[in-house]
């Protein structure tokens, strides 16, 4: 239900039609009988800052921010939480009454909580993380928060993995070891978890070109891609007997703290 006094927030991205956030937040709003809405906002890169200014003036409580705005949101926020500062990316902007805009990053905690739920502790364990973009950056921070011992960051273009490892190493206690996909076979046998943070396997993208035969039998496989939910990678992992974890857990665990910040009530995941 929505009245004139409803609490309004948004989710902003380009494109935005594939976003599950309005559905997820809408479900919780119904369940908790909150007078409010989370509106999908298709906003292109160039329009980001003026739209944020307009929404703030129109009384929005804040917005969830997704691709391609996470870095711009970080730059625009007046102040940020520690995770956002480390990630250099913001996925939640909160508009405060004094006119200041706060940036938070709930992606990393989403992954941390999803991992804690699905694979248990990673303390002292080795992980292979595929990709070196914004999602990989957040994932590496989440793995560090889980006390992983060593994270192999492998990227199609190895130089990007090297740059990411160099930038993040001063911020984390786990050992970051960068490499290219040609290093996959050498490291895959000794890890407890493989995370795909590349956009390979996403709808309209080719699947990941790696052979799972090299992967440690006991390793779990997590795909951050959630569209489709059952990626080719997860299908193959399941067929080989690995624990396969889709991106929905992460999505829900990052949405819960966002919902609480925007609507004032902690929802049940
Ligand atoms: P995000 O913020 O979602 O991480 P990004 O910064 O654009 O997005 O990064 C996309 C990642 O997916 C990169 O690591 C990219 O690898 P390159 O740096 O080598 O381009 C990776 N990627 C995209 N398509 C891929 C594919 N088909 N196979 C392997 N990696 C792919």
Image (spheres, helix red, strand yellow):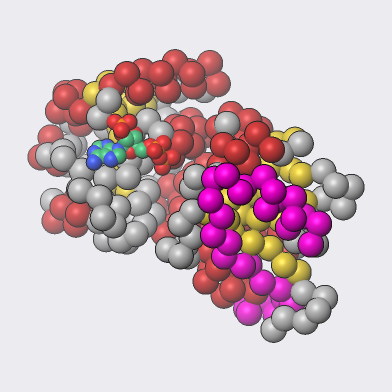
Residue pictured at 53% horizontal, 51% vertical:
44
User: Residue 68 or 28: which is nearer the viewer?
Assistant: 68
Identify the residue shown where x is 28% and y is 57%.
203
Quadrant location of the C terminus?
bottom right
Quarter of the view holding residue 10 = bottom right
Above or below 116: residue 167: above
Q: Is residue 51 magenta?
A: yes
Answer left or right for 45 relative to 202: right
Q: Quadrant of the N terminus?
A: bottom right
Q: Which residues are drawn in magenta?
A: 30-58
Membership of 115 in magenta stretch? no
Looking at the picture, how far across and down is residue 202, in whole percent? 30, 53
**Count of labels in the image:** 0
Residue 183 location in percent, x, y? 19, 23
Dividing the picture into quadrants, the one containing residue 103 is top right
Q: On screen, 218 above or below 247?
A: above
Identity of the residue drawn at 61% across and 54% down = 64
Res. 110 in view: no
Q: Nearer the viewer, residue 201 or 170?
A: 201
Using residue 245 as the reference point, say whether residue 250 is left or right of it.
Answer: right
The spot of residue 18 in percent (x, y) is 42, 63
Q: Is residue 231 visible?
A: yes
Ligand 1 is found in the corner quadrant, namely top left
171 and 13: which is toward the camera = 13
Which residue occupies 75% across, 61% down?
A: 60
Residue projecting furthest to the right: 98
Residue 193 position, x and y percent, is 31, 39
């Amino acid at each position: 239900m929505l009245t004139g006094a409803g609490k309004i927030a948004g989710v902003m991205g380009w494109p935005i039609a594939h976003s599950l956030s309005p559905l997820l937040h809408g479900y919780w709003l119904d369940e908790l009988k909150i007078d409010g809405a989370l509106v999908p906002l298709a906003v292109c890169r160039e329009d980001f800052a003026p739209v944020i200014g307009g929404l703030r003036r129109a009384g929005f409580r804040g917005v969830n921010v997704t691709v391609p705005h996470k870095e711009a949101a970080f730059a625009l926020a007046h102040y940020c939480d520690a995770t956002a500062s480390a990630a250099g990316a913001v996925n939640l902007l909160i508009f405060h009454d004094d006119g200041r805009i706060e940036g938070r990053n709930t992606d990393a905690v989403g992954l941390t909580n999803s991992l804690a739920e699905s694979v248990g502790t990673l303390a002292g364990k080795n992980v292979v993380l595929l990709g070196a973009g914004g999602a990989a950056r957040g994932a590496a921070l989440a793995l560090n928060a889980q006390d992983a011992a060593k994270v192999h960051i492998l990227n199609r273009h190895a130089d990007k993995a090297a740059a990411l490892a160099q930038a993040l190493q001063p911020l984390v206690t786990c050992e970051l070891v960068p490499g290219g996909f040609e290093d996959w076979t050498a490291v895959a046998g000794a890890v407890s978890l493989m995370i795909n943070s590349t956009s390979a396997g996403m709808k309209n993208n080719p699947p990941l070109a790696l052979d799972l035969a090299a992967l440690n039998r006991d390793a779990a496989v997590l795909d951050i891609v959630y569209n489709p939910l059952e990626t080719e990678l997860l299908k193959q992992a399941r067929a080989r007997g690995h624990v396969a974890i889709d991106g929905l857990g992460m999505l829900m665990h990052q949405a819960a703290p966002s919902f609480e910040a925007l609507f004032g009530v902690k929802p049940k995941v």
